[in-house]
Image: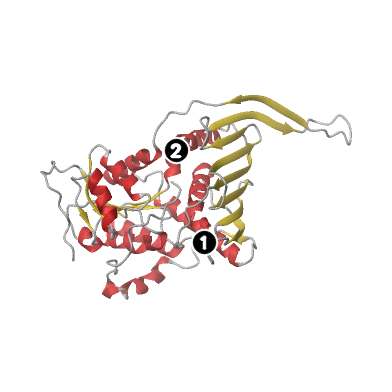
């Protein structure tokens, strides 16, 4: 077993929260930076199986120890929390092992590859009085928070429908479809805005480049409030697009994350005036002012990490809660069931069909009750979009 590589130099006084980052591929270095810049937090270790990934972090942060051994990192009593930025297929094993070792867990989206695994992690975290938080970064985006205020205030009126497009050229993930890679962003935003699970979803997709790995998907969802939503996801597009249109009975909003004016409010709509006689129904269309509200600049990742650290200290659930993370996985599983049924509408149920306790026997059979995590590849982030 490789020893943690201690860099030369002295050590600072221990902070109130000691964090280790696991996985140094696409997104992991951003987590290292965000935790490093957080007041009252110290990054005490980074972990990756690839030496060049560790070397890249060492050049930027020479005082941070590194290791290629995840079990050794978990055995380190100086680590209070583990931040996981690895492929989706590894999330359950790595998160469960961290909880078992008594560590708080921040895991990049999605929380787990299945509902039963997500429920298992939540039950384990609750039983151990530990925090597990999924990394849904867009919940901390100032434009997303502004739109939440508009919806909650009633300024938009009844939300008729929402159309969302999240497309770009790449990054194809080897162990996850475009639904599980990009979908968590939009479904977490919808859960935050509407505070509801869809009643049903129907979806169609195609695997254009990698066989059996859908890289384009079109998803329709119906919510209990009557709101309908269309979500377009793709790794194959000529340009990057993150655009959402929200149409309400009073006003409409366009949220364009790539624009210098990310939120534009349209005082537009249509209504049916009271008819003076039978058959006299003529729509009245309203086109009023277009307002671009001032959005305070703030880095979503920094706000997300701040929320995680505050939740560890206070015990108060973060905005990106484990319950919201579980709801996102429920929707993703329902989308997969619809895809497996050639686009037939599928119900999204609040109660999982497979309960978490059914996983207990399987887990006990892994490495004599301990998870075998030594050989898991840690170098590739599960997040190609945050």
The picture places residue 62, in percent across and down from the top left corner, at 19, 45
Which sits in the foreground, 161 or 340? 340
According to the picture, the residue beneath numbered tag 1 turns out to be 333
Name the residue at the top extreme: 289
The picture places residue 326, in percent across and down from the top left corner, at 45, 55
Q: Earlier in the sequence, mark 2 or mark 1?
A: 2
The picture places residue 241, in percent across and down from the top left corner, at 55, 43
Element at badge 2? Answer: loop
- Residue shown at 32% from the left, 61% from the top: 94
Between label 2 and label 1, give the one nearer the viewer: 2
Q: Is residue 336 left or right of residue 68?
A: right
Image quarter of the N terminus: bottom left
Quarter holding residue 122: bottom left
- Residue shown at 57% from the left, 49% from the top: 237
Mark number for residue 141? 2
Which sits in the foreground, 87 or 238? 238
The picture places residue 298, in percent across and down from the top left corner, at 39, 33
Element at badge 1? Answer: helix
For label 2, count other residues whose C-alpha is less than 10 Å away and answer few (under 14), some (14-19) or many (20+). Answer: many
Q: Is residue 121 left or right of residue 182?
A: left
- Residue shown at 43% from the left, 64% from the top: 116
Name the residue at the left extreme: 10
């Amino acid at each position: 077993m490789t020893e943690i590589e201690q860099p030369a130099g002295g050590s600072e006084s221990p902070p109130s929260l000691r964090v280790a980052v696991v996985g140094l591929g696409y997104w992991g270095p951003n987590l290292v930076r965000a935790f490093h810049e957080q007041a009252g937090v110290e990054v005490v270790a980074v972990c990756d199986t690839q030496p060049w990934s560790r070397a890249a972090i060492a050049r930027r942060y020479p005082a941070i120890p590194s290791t290629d051994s995840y079990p050794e990192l978990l055995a380190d009593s100086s680590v209070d929390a583990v931040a996981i930025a690895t492929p989706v297929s590894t999330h359950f094993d790595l998160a469960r092992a961290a909880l078992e070792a008594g560590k708080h867990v921040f895991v990049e989206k999605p929380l787990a590859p299945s509902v039963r695994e997500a429920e298992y992690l939540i039950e384990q975290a609750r039983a151990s009085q530990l925090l597990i938080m999924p990394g849904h970064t867009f919940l901390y985006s100032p434009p997303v928070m502004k739109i939440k205020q508009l919806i909650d205030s009633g300024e938009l009126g009844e939300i008729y429908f929402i159309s969302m497009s999240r497309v770009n050229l790449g990054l194809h993930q080897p162990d996850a479809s475009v639904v599980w890679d990009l979908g968590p962003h939009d479904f977490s935003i919808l859960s935050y805005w509407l505070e509801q699970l869809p009643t049903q979803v129907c979806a169609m997709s195609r695997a254009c480049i990698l066989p059996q790995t859908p890289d384009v998907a079109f998803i329709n969802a119906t919510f209990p409030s009557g709101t309908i939503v269309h979500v377009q996801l793709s790794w194959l597009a000529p340009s990057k697009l993150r655009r959402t249109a929200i149409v309400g009975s009073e006003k409409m909003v366009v949220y364009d994350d790539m624009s210098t004016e990310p939120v534009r409010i349209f005082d537009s709509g249509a209504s049916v005036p009271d008819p003076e006689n039978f058959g006299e129904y003529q729509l009245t269309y309203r086109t009023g002012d277009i307002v671009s509200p001032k959005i305070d600049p703030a880095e979503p990742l920094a706000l997300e990490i701040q929320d995680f650290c505050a939740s560890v200290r206070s015990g108060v659930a973060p905005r990106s809660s484990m319950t919201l993370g579980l709801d996102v996985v429920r929707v993703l599983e329902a989308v997969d069931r619809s895809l497996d049924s050639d686009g037939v509408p599928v119900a999204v149920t609040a109660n999982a069909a497979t309960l978490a306790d059914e996983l207990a026997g399987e887990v006990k059979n892994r490495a004599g009750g301990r998870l075998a995590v030594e050989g898991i590849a840690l170098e590739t982030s599960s997040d190609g979009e945050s």
